[in-house]
Image (cartoon, rainbow, N blue to C red):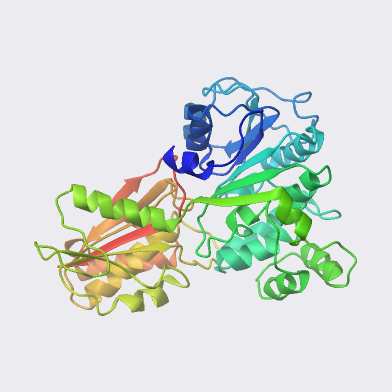
């Protein structure tokens, strides 16, 4: 993995490191560790709990105890201890996603104990990618697991930005907001954080809600967000109020000591996804140019200045005046609000913004080609990875009516399946949010 090799430049690997790998992109990161010959000891991998991913990563499963110093008879959570990827010194666990569950809580406690038990002179290498906030979880003291999960669910259904969601998550957790970093610092350990960003800001405290990163936000800011979330649990709100009142310690903040012990580097971000899209278009025979300059063939690729965010229908208004014959690219994640108690179909951010944009362009009389891809291989609950549309697909008025109905029913992926315009879902080796490509003919 060239990005990992580049990020590890200047970091000493002459002795074993404790590797903690979490999120949706564990597979290529473990491969990268192997290719670089990095020695690991007392390491843990927290990977997606999915049948497809397990086929790639795991063989054999059992409960663990002595390896992590933790057993949890209440969780009934099988975890894998033999990996299809044979990297010595690493134990493999599952995490639940998109909501934290028994596997997430099991993994959370196991990681805390593993970090605490490692020798003070053993550096810690944390490889963090999106999905970590659900897959690696442990509620703050006095907050039940059920309430933690309910708070998480209310946040992701609220349509709030990922920055606002993670702000609250960090203040309801023993792990997030630098919780794991704080434990490592207690014994003076060196910590190296390498992160794959799926957030607009690329801020380390927002990637996976920052388990190994200091947090610049406060309980007061978290409470302000929580008060606007429909269905946010009272018990979780009380935890935030206790933090505002000084009855709970704040998340970890920057300090001179922390600056000495901590190294943080970004492996890749949504810009990487756009770079890859440009190369693919070039390899397919389309001329590519940066900064809107023209090549000999006169073809153009432009990056939209506004990343995908906010309500899909609102964001689509940014695209009303696209120039014909130009491929446009954008990355990010729209915000889809699901009312509490709403029964939904199948879909996610990628399929929703695909239909919203396709309808807007069709209603304006445009001919177009359009695709939105969930770069992690999974769009919401759809088991798809987005989809594609051409203007001909939504030309009949009845089809457009059916598309609008599917959006109202949160069944955008279901609609795309009926017209055979879905991309198949699969565990991805990236996670940079969603990628959009559109061309007006």
The answer to whether residue 196 is above or below residue 318 is: above
From the viewer's side, name the closer residue of 317 and 420: 317
**395 to the left or right of 22:** left
**Identity of the residue drawn at 77% across and 63% down:** 236
Q: Which residue is farthest right?
A: 247
> Can the viewer see residue 69 in this picture?
yes
How many numbered marks have been drawn onto this rendered protein structure?
A: 0
Residue 364 falls in image quadrant: bottom left
| Residue 332 point in image, percent of width and height | 44, 62
- Residue 358 rendering spot, x and y as whole percentages: 28, 67
Q: Position of residue 179 (x, y in %)?
A: 76, 51
Q: Image height check: is 269 above or below 294? A: above
**Residue situated in front as seen by the camera: 402 or 328:** 328
Image point 77% across, 44% down: which residue? 184
**Is residue 411 visible in this depiction of the protein?**
no
Q: Residue at x 25, y 73 (%)?
A: 361
On screen, residue 388 versus residue 189, left or right, reads left
In the rendered view, tell whether residue 267 sits above or below residue 114: below
Left or right placement of residue 410 versus residue 62 in this view? left
Quarter that holds the N terminus: top left
Residue closest to the eye, 111 or 143: 111
Q: Position of residue 320 (x, y in %)?
A: 28, 79
Can you name the residue that lies furthest to the front here?
Answer: 10
- Indicate the quadrant containing the C terminus: top left, top right, bottom left or bottom right: bottom left
């Amino acid at each position: 993995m060239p990005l990992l090799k580049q990020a590890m430049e200047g970091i000493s690997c002459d002795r074993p490191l404790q590797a903690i790998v979490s999120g949706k992109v564990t597979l290529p990161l473990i491969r990268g560790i192997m290719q670089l010959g990095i020695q690991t000891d007392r390491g843990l991998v927290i990977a997606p709990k999915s049948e497809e991913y397990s086929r790639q990563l795991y063989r054999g499963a059992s409960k663990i105890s002595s390896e992590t110093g933790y057993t949890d008879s209440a969780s009934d959570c099988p975890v894998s201890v033999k990996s299809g990827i044979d990297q010595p010194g690493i134990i493999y666990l599952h995490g639940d996603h998109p909501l934290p569950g028994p596997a997430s809580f099991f993994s959370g406690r196991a990681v805390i104990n593993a970090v605490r038990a490692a020798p003070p002179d053993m550096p810690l290498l944390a490889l963090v990618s999106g999905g970590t906030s659900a897959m690696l979880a442990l509620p703050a003291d006095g907050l039940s697991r059920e309430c933690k999960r309910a708070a998480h669910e209310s946040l992701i259904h609220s349509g709030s930005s990922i920055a606002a969601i993670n702000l609250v998550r960090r203040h309801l957790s023993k792990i997030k907001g630098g919780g794991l970093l704080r434990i490592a610092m207690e014994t003076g350990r060196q910590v190296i954080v390498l992160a794959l960003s799926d957030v607009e800001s690329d801020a380390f405290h927002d990637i996976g809600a920052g388990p190994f990163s200091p947090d610049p936000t406060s309980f007061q800011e978290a409470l302000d967000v929580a008060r606007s979330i429909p269905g946010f649990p009272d018990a979780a709100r009380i935890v935030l109020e206790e933090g505002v009142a000084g009855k709970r310690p704040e998340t970890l903040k920057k300090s001179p000591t922390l600056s000495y012990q901590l190294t943080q580097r970004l492996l890749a971000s949504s810009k990487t996804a756009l770079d890859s899209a440009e190369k693919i278009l070039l390899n397919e025979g389309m001329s590519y140019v940066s900064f809107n300059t023209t090549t000999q063939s006169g073809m153009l690729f432009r990056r939209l200045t506004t990343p995908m965010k906010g309500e899909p229908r609102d964001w689509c208004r940014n695209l009303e005046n696209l120039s014909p014959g130009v491929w446009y690219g954008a990355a990010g994640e729209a915000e889809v609000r699901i009312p509490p108690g709403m029964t939904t179909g199948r879909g996610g951010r990628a399929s929703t913004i695909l239909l919203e944009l396709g309808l807007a362009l069709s209603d304006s009389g445009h001919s177009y080609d359009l695709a939105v891809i969930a770069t992690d291989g999974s769009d919401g609950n759809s088991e798809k990875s987005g989809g594609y549309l051409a203007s001909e697909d939504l030309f009949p008025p009845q089809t457009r009516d059916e598309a609008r109905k599917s959006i109202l029913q949160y069944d955008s992926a279901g609609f795309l399946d009926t017209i055979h315009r879905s991309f198949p879902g699969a565990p991805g080796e990236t996670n940079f949010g969603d990628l959009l490509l559109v061309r007006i003919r």
